[in-house]
Image (tube, rainbow, N blue to C red):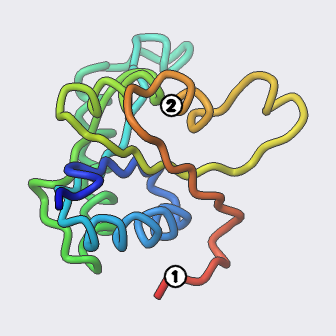
């Protein structure tokens, strides 16, 4: 019998809620024996990032990448997730996540969702856009805040 999923991509935003998303994904990975990738997306950095202040875009981009990489490793370490499984993407989050999943043949994307309502729902969130444009299954994990208990 073949496993339902071969490669699970878990998209995190580096907040404490990211642990809850990882907690939800790991049992699926463990049961299926799937490859795991944990991804975080940095938005594009432009010369207008600093407003009226002159900004060295390359230096700023590197600093943001270094910070995100350190935070991603910090999140992954308690789970024993190695650095080869951690990926920093750039661009618009939903497009970058879906592109990663396609390029790396992920067949499940796990993403946190705040379950927004009203105007935020009409405009769409990252998780809604990932779901709308994904070429594979998407599991949207409802996150409410850092007070959530980890999954056993």
Q: Of residues 137 and 77, which is closer to you in this image?
A: 137
Q: Of the two numbered discs 1 and 2 on the same chain, state the one appearing first in sequence.
A: 2
Q: Please, is residue 47 above or below residue 152 in the view?
A: above
Mark 1 element type: loop
Residue appearing at x 31%, y 24% in the figure: 99
- Residue 130: give its label: 2
**Quarter residue 116 falls in:** top right
Q: Is residue 133 left or right of residue 44?
A: right
Name the residue furthest bottom: 152
- The local crowd at label 2, few if under 14, some if 14 to 19, many if 20 or more residues have their Cα within 10 Å, is many
**Quarter residue 27 falls in:** bottom left
> Measured from the top left, where is residue 112 in percent x and y?
55, 52
> Measured from the top left, where is residue 121 in percent x and y?
79, 32
Q: Of residues 94 and 56, which is closer to you in this image?
A: 94
Name the residue furthest front: 1
> Measured from the top left, where is residue 42 in percent x and y?
38, 33
Residue appearing at x 25%, y 65% in the figure: 32
- Residue 12: give its label: none
Q: Residue at label 1?
A: 150
Name the residue furthest right: 118
Q: CA distance from mark 1 to mark 2?
A: 24 Å
Residue appearing at x 9%, y 54% in the figure: 84
Q: Please, is residue 27 above or below residue 38 in the view?
A: below
- The local crowd at label 1, few if under 14, some if 14 to 19, many if 20 or more residues have their Cα within 10 Å, is few
> Measured from the top left, where is residue 131 in percent x and y?
54, 32
Q: Of residues 122 and 45, which is closer to you in this image?
A: 122
Residue appearing at x 26%, y 58% in the figure: 70
Q: Please, is residue 109 above or below residue 15 in the view?
A: above
Q: Is residue 105 left or right of residue 17?
A: left
Quadrant housing the N terminus: bottom left
Mark 2 element type: helix
């Amino acid at each position: 019998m073949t496993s339902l999923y071969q490669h699970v991509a878990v998209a995190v935003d580096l907040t404490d809620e990211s642990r809850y998303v990882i907690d939800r994904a790991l049992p699926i990975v463990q049961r299926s024996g799937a490859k795991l990738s944990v991804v975080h997306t940095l938005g594009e950095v432009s010369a207008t990032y600093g407003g009226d202040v002159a900004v060295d875009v390359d230096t700023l981009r590197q600093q943001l990448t270094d910070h995100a990489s350190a935070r991603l490793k910090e999140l992954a370490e308690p789970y024993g997730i190695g650095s080869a499984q951690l990926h920093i993407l750039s661009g618009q989050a939903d497009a970058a996540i879906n592109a990663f999943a396609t390029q790396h043949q992920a067949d499940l994307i796990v993403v946190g969702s705040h379950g927004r309502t009203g105007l935020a729902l009409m405009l769409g969130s990252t998780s809604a856009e990932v779901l709308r444009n994904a070429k594979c299954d998407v599991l949207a994990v409802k996150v409410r805040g850092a007070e959530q208990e980890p999954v056993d």
